[in-house]
Amino acid sequence: MADRTAPPSTGNDQGHDHAATDAPLSAENARVIALSRKDFVSDQEVRWCPGCGDYSILAQTQKTMPDFGVPRENIVFISGIGCSGRLPYYMNTYGFHTIHGRAPTLATGLKVARPELMVWVITGDGDALSIGGNHVLHSMRRNVDIKLVMFNNRIYGLTKGQASPTSELGKRTKSSPAGTVDFPVQPLSFALAAEASFVARSVDTHTEHLQETLNRAGFHRGSAFVEVLQNCNIFNDGAFRDFTERDVREDRMLILEHGKPMIFGKDRDKGIRLNGLHPEVVQLGNGVAESELLVHDESAEDPYLAYMLSRMWWPQFPVPVGVLRRIQRPTHDQLMQAQVDDAVTRHGPGDLAQLLVSGETWVVD
Amino acid sequence: MTTETAPGKDIDVHELERVTIRFAGDSGDGMQLTGTQFTRTAAVFGNDISTLPDFPAEIRAPAGSLPGVSGFQISFSSTDIHTPGDEPDVLVAMNPAALRTNIGDLPAGGALIVNQDAFTANNLKKAGYESNPLADGSLKPFNVFEIPISALNSRALEGLGMTAKQVDLTKNFFALGLMFWLYERSMEPTLRWVDEKFSAKPAIAEGNKRALRAGYAFGETTEMFHTTYRVAPARLAPGTYRNITGNEATALGFVAAARLAGRDLVYGSYPITPATDILHQLSTYKNFGVKTFQAEDEIAAIGSAIGASYGGHLGLTASSGPGIALKSEALNLAVMVELPLVVVDVQRAGPSTGMPTKNEQADLLMAMFGRNSDSPVPIVAPATPAECFDYAIEAWRLALKYMTPVVYLSDAFLATGSEPWSLPSVADLPQIGVENHTDRGTFQPYARHPQTLARPWAVPGTPGLEHRVGGLEKADITGNVSYDPDNHHRMQTLRAEKVAGIANDIPELEVFGPPRGELLVLGWGSTYGAIRSAVERLQSEGSSVAHAHLRHLNPFPRNTESVLRSYRRVLVPEVNMGQLSMLLRARYLIDVAGFNRVRGKPFRISEIRQAAEVFLGGNGHNPNG
């Protein structure tokens, strides 16, 4: 949790997340504004099923909001359709519950108009990867400065249990009684291919890690894609249980830390080594030294390491969580605003009367 | 008609009131450019003008083929005109395919200028001619001028070192030069244009200028022509004018609306014919604070516009029919969240992909009803290219004042057609706009203005007004999610009343002609010119006929019913199968008669006139028959 609440201008030893001068995000602001979790709790009654993983995601989101030093009125939560889509109602910020799959498009338009706002997109595996797949692709590659949090429960919950684009092949659901015939998409591989400048994963029940991951997404400037493995205890209970349960998770998950070797296990005795082009799990000791292990580099310019990590899944591999990729690119809103500023510099602010008479005119007396 | 003798050879000069020329050739022959240059020249000279480009959807259909024919018709006049002319007086056909697809519109006695060199066996075959029309006598009804344009042009450009292909590409300017001579037009505006356009390619510039001058000189020296024609400047109302297409006027209107409202414009758009030029144009107005966003699809285009409006800017999107269909769910979201938004539909012939470059006005019912549930939106529709400017501002006036999405219906004919535009003074433009709500003491997201029923516009960044909106039904006043049965009924009623109330805030329907009588011809959109011209002619012959034109299609002006009931019959010409007719019948229980033609082309004056005569003659058979 190295840079969790660090002001980006001073505490970011891992690189280059922010231009310190124009970032509204800072721990200093956070101290001045002095908001707490309860300031982000709206007056609406939370209506998810008891035991739903969404409660934890909401709580961690509310908890990390004060860290950014952004006044509540400058924060907007935009969601699509699905169980996740209700989250904005519970945040005491500006919120927009839009239509299925299209939240990134509204978020893009809002950032084009109002670059200074902090915009979060809340979505699910169906909303983001099925009906809204195209918009996720394009908002990520444009580097729109939005923090997209995708609740992945590998099922359609709000419509009561149909297969989603992340459901495993052959999964039996109400819409696929004989098992699905659709090969699933790996969300983080998709996000990387879509050129997201920040790609991370966490788990609903790993509250501290989730809060840290959301925090780091919030401090990222550019398109952030966060997959949260989220349990739907009604329609797909235990989807991630095999590796997320308290007693097994240390052996079955890999917590990524920038600049650190990829070590995991209760006894921290296992690691990931590269064998040719393929990762392999190795037992430390018995001639395998820590220095042989892959060292995580979330800021690598090329995406190969991050992509490799995005393909690792239990039981062949421990499931990686944390920040897979975090690079710096000019954001969509910055580039667009720069063109406007440049045009004003070169041509002066537009004069409507002059514009109307541009082109060839003639006078009738 | 005055006649005088021009210097050089024995030439009569005839004075005409109005001339209609159609340039037709291969889509690679530069016919649109030729037409545009003639239009500029006529406009700057002071004629009233009206133009009709007619081009294929294929960028380069096979050379010489029938589908590849591109045409541009311009009517220019010394009097006030409303249409590009029913039929050309002169047809310039650059190849057999152009002749074949256009000769049917040329009246007997009309002038036909053909590029003789293009009438090769191969081209004749591609156009489906079994015999050469230049030789088989089939063109006898016309006044034919066979000119070896390609050969004459090549000779004129000898020594410039241009390739044969480059030379061939300039032959349209030879034809243009000839037309300039024939109609006593100055070459200067086009010569200046060539110098600007090809400033980096002096050889090409020289080639085009030589081609233009060669065509002009050919007219002067050949024995073929014995007459030139003069069309005096029109007596337009005093003012400063420019020639403008509907798409240009639409884009300018939106920039003006943003200025008037004191907010920036965000234009989300996906390329689609015939709306794309609006994107091209708005993308050059960045110094006006205009941000254009070329979205990944039509849905993202409208989504971004709604996002921008949510942020307090003017969120605008445009498309044509197929794209509007894709936007309907998001448009309904804007209805539910009651945010200002303008959606432009530059209509084209459908259904489905239809005929993308051809005209139709058949999206009216989609604009009215093409969304789930009862979902009222105001609809405006300009009637002429220049009027597109005014209605772009009007669309925003309504969107902002009533916090509602507004549909703006243009069409391919308006979008690409042009006319002189009397430039407004900025000071005379309407004041539009609305303040953001900032007072936390009085804020309720769905409280309503007592007159307009508009809800407050509280934009992110306003302290203390944090609230949530969305597509779920809202509780009256608080805007909280509500499934209460009575609340839903109330909200549906409020949404309907808000839009219906706009009728009190728009001009009454005006009538051109007698306030009551035998026949009212009622139109909307780009049919204005043909209807007005037909009605003028009938009136001059003593018929009891009037014209009214709707610019607001939802709601209708409040006097619409009384106007309709002031005439024995109402004729509604539309380039669709009867959409306004259906709305009028449903709303007023008046038995209006439709006149419906969907040929991908604007109406001719003559067909409206014939349809009207059916009712004026009293032998009322169905005009569609």
Image: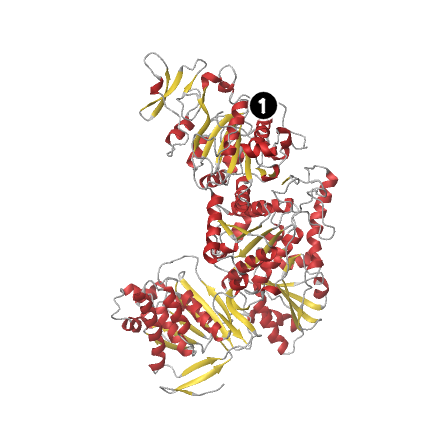
Relative to B408, is B206 above or below?
below
Amino acid beneath label 1? Asn
Q: Which one is nearer the viewer's eye here, A4 or B38?
A: A4
For residue B607, side relative to residue A11 (left or right): right
Mark 1 element type: loop
Chain letter of mark 1 equals A
**Residue B297 percent location from the top left of the image:** 49, 46
Badge 1, how many Cα within 10 Å: few under 14, some, many 20+? Answer: some
- Indicate the colouring scheme: secondary structure
Q: Which one is nearer the viewer's eye here, B153 or B578?
A: B153
The image quarter in which residue B584 lies? bottom right
> What residue sits right under mark 1 in the picture?
A233
Q: Residue at x 30, y 64 (%)?
A: B166
Could one spot residue B325 in this view of the protein? yes
Image quadrant for the C terminus of chain B?
A: bottom right
Could one spot residue B127 in this view of the protein? no
The image quarter in which residue B115 lies? bottom left
**Residue B223 percent location from the top left of the image:** 34, 83
Furthest-top residue in this view: A286
Q: Which one is nearer the viewer's eye here, A24 or B27?
A: A24
The image quarter in which residue B221 lies? bottom left
Relative to A347, is A193 above or below?
above
**Residue B103 percent location from the top left of the image:** 43, 70
Relative to A361, is B436 above or below?
above
For residue A305, side relative to residue A27 (left or right): left
**Residue A148 percent location from the top left of the image:** 52, 35
Relative to A22, is B113 above or below?
below
